Amino acid sequence: YPSNLQMKESSGLTQAMCRAKGGAPGFKVAILGAAGGIGQPLAMLMKMNPLVSVLHLYDVVNAPGVTADISHMDTRAVVRGFLGQPQLESALACMDLVIIPAGVPRKPGMTRDDLFNINAGIVWTLCEGIAKCCPNAIVNLISNPVNSTVPIAAEVFKKAGTYDPKRLLGVTMLDVVRANTFVAEVLGLDPREVDVPVVGGHAGVTILPLLSQVKPPCSFTPQETEYLTNRIQNGGTEVVEAKAGTGSATLSMAYAAVKFADACLRGLRGDAGVVECAFVASQVTELPFFASKVRLGRIGVEKVFQLGPLNEYERIGLEKAKKELAGSIQKGVSFIKK
Ligand code: NAD
Ligand code: LMR
């Protein structure tokens, strides 16, 4: 039968939905916001991931078309589409990993925080569905402003009694991807050889690249440090302006989201030494959430790493980042509490 059969079912979960094709171990992944600018290339790339056995594509518009299209790819994952709120629960049932790129993107002149009013409500609704239907799933939250939507998700899960900080991760991978690219350009290296930790959060000065910890070890002039830090912090705005009102980063974000989701799945599989940066519940600073390197495992976040030695430039950047982050986190928490 067509792989998007579930779209025609009003509710309920069949046994077939929970079984992986071919019997080999694989993970069940849902994308919420799958018909969007990020959602579509993300769905395509996840369909290409051999660790995925079932791929559920949910959106409030256009999910049937995207699902029909993606489902013709001759890769392993069985694809099913789900359209609109009445099908959210079916989309989420039995999922191991839920990736959320649902929500509106920026236009030139806007900050990520300007998206709060619309996206906070979207994330709230979707997280209520997760709490009900797949409370043990790992959640990768992409919707902006990440610095506030992750605290919102945590509060929703707390209210539902399902919160596990190890399973909620704000996706800051695009900052790392950009940092690797821009640093490699300056050093004249292949970006695949470069590893730049980016900590803090995902907006403006909260994006803090630790250029003193770049691998392979290297050093930068003060001018290079200033240039790289500004470019990494404003990478999102660079794309928003270039797209001139038609949206924000989608293709590089889909790439980054898949890189991050793949790391989460390898962790779930039990691979050793899977380490990436993410915005998570944290005791690394006095703030309740902070992005830093984390080790991913069978339970989600197995370990949150300390920041390591910072230079003077980074210490000043950290203070600025924490000040802005504190407000954004509080805004998210208050949104649910009030
Ligand atoms: P888009 O408008 O192209 O797509 C968003 C999709 O979400 C649309 O298909 C829309 O129908 C869907 N949607 C809206 N409400 C929904 C709901 N209640 N349930 C399910 N789906 C819903 O936007 P985009 O370019 O894909 O960006 C999506 C979000 O990702 C934005 O908030 C953007 O700021 C953010 N983003 C984050 C990062 C990051 O690094 N974390 C990077 C880029 C973009
Ligand atoms: C990005 O960093 O590209 C995203 O957060 C989207 C944006 O609004 O900049």
Image (spheres, rainbow, N blue to C red):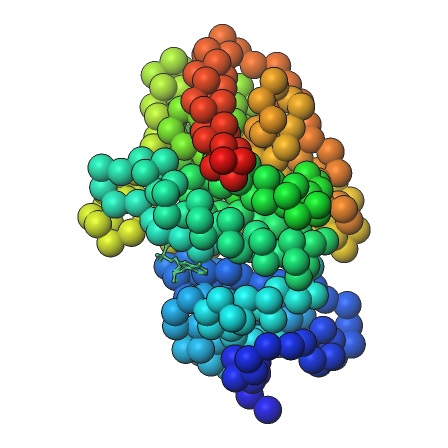
In percent of the image, x 64 and y 71: which residue is there?
54
Ligand 1 shows up in which quadrant of the image? bottom left
Identify whether 257 is placed above or below 206: below
Identify whether 303 is placed above or below 50: above
Picture quadrant where residue 186 is located? top left
Query: Of 33 and 256, which appears nearest the observer?
Result: 33
Query: Of 167 and 313, which appears nearest the observer?
Result: 167
Residue 214 visible here: no
Tell me where residue 326 appears, x and y as whole percent: 49, 23
Q: Is residue 110 left or right of residue 138?
A: left
Identify whether 55 is placed above or below 151: below
In percent of the image, x 55 and y 80: which residue is there?
10
Q: How many marks?
A: 0
In percent of the image, x 40 and y 15: which residue is there?
221
Query: Of 120 and 202, which appears nearest the observer?
Result: 120
Q: Is residue 212 left or right of residue 27?
A: left
Outermost residue on the left side: it is: 244
In percent of the image, x 57 and y 28: which residue is there?
290
